[in-house]
Image (cartoon, grey):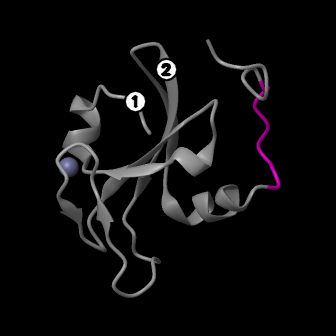
Amino acid sequence: MPRNNRAKRTKRSAEPEELDLSSLRMGIRRTEIKRGVEYTTQTSIGANAEEDKSWICPNCNLQISKGLSHIVAWDSVRGVETRRHFHNACWKSFQGQLL
Ligand SMILES: [Zn+2]
């Protein structure tokens, strides 16, 4: 079960978190439930990432290139520090837990 901190936070549009600032540039944020765990997902094209930035998709263990449209997902309860980058198709099939 989720712990009590921030689990039932009411939605507010302006939160003083760094990621919310970048989300304005990054894309659309959604909430999804997978196997009873609530995740927040956001589309990203990685266009404003640093040079040579790339990510390893935890579903297929392949690299996501800078500039490729993909999904950033994190555990809504545990917070943005659990976020991982997925290929769009990989996020759809991903059923595991974010570590
Ligand atoms: Zn993948």
Q: Is 14 in the magenta?
A: yes
Nearest the camera: 69 or 53? Answer: 53
Using residue 66 as the reference point, say whether residue 1 is left or right of it.
right
Say if 35 sits above or below 87 in the image: above
Q: Residue at x 63, y 41 (%)?
A: 79
Residue 29 image point, x, y percent: 53, 43
Provide the residue designation for mark 1: 97
Q: Is mark 2 within 8 Å of ligand 1?
A: no
Q: Secondary structure at mark 1?
A: loop
Q: Residue at x 64, y 30 (%)?
A: 77
Q: CA distance from mark 2 to mark 1?
A: 8 Å
Please name the amino acid that badge 2 sits on. Answer: Val
Q: In front of the other: label 2 or label 1?
A: 1
> Where the N terminus falls, by quadrant?
top right
Q: Are marks 2 and 1 in contact (CB under 8 Å)?
A: yes
Mark 1 surroundings: few (<14), some (14-19) or many (≥20) residues within 10 A: few
Q: Residue at x 72, y 23 (%)?
A: 7
Which numbered circle lies on residue 9?
Answer: none
Provide the residue designation for mark 2: 37
Residue 72 image point, x, y percent: 43, 50
Residue 9 image point, x, y percent: 78, 26
Q: Quadrant of residue 22?
A: bottom right
Which region of the structure is painted magenta? 9-16
Q: Is 51 in the magenta?
A: no
